[in-house]
Image (cartoon, rainbow, N blue to C red):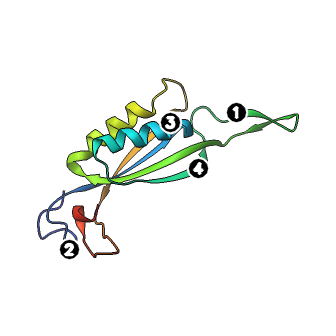
Amino acid sequence: MCEAGNGPAGNQGIGMKYIIAIIKPFKLDEVRDALGALGVAGMTVSEVKGFGRQKGQTEIYRGAEYSTNMLPKVKVEVACTDALAAQVVETIQQAASTDAIGDGKIFVLDLSSATRIRTGETGDTAL
């Protein structure tokens, strides 16, 4: 957590986290609704492909079976204050879980600064 005056300009001593969640695509609506209920103001969502322990899957395309090692996933990115980070992680974990292999991962990174382009606000007020 940045101390007032020691962090990026405008951070006002409030620490921030950047949370990245890789989830199954069909769980996106549940995650978005749960985060909205928590008060998360915004998020970025990307369609991605990747693999983990499950090592891919076999698919059928035009009658031919082939193996792919990249599975479709959704990446959800959320910036929030330190105070909200644990709740955001727990909310994503509960909403995205199917109790099956391939549910995904959640990563939490320290966020040193944020700036709202339109107004120039910085720190947690830019979130």
Crowd around label 4: few <14 · some 14–19 · many ≥20 (10 Å) = some
Between marks 4 and 2, how big is the CA–CA gap? 34 Å
Between marks 3 and 4, how big is the CA–CA gap? 14 Å
Crowd around label 1: few <14 · some 14–19 · many ≥20 (10 Å) = few
Rendered residue at 29%/53% (across/down): 80
Between marks 3 and 2, how big is the CA–CA gap? 37 Å
Mark seen at residue 9: 2
- The residue under label 3 is which amino acid type? Lys
In this image, 77 relative to 89: left or right? right
Between marks 1 and 3, how big is the CA–CA gap? 19 Å
Q: Image quadrant of residue 38?
A: top left
Rendered residue at 35%/42% (across/down): 35
Rendered residue at 50%/48% (across/down): 75
- The residue under label 2 is which amino acid type? Ala
In this image, 8 relative to 41: left or right? left
Q: Nearer the viewer, mark 3 or mark 4?
A: 3
Q: Is residue 124 above or below residue 80?
A: below
What x and y, as percent, mark residue 31? 42, 39
Circles 3 and 4: CB distance less than 8 Å? Answer: no
What x and y, as percent, mark residue 57? 70, 33
Q: Earlier in the sequence, mark 1 or mark 2?
A: 2
Taking depth in this image into account, of 89 and 67 the one nearest to the observer is 89
Dot 1 corresponds to which residue?
57
Callout 3: helix, strand or loop? helix
Dot 3 corresponds to which residue?
27
Dot 4 corresponds to which residue?
48
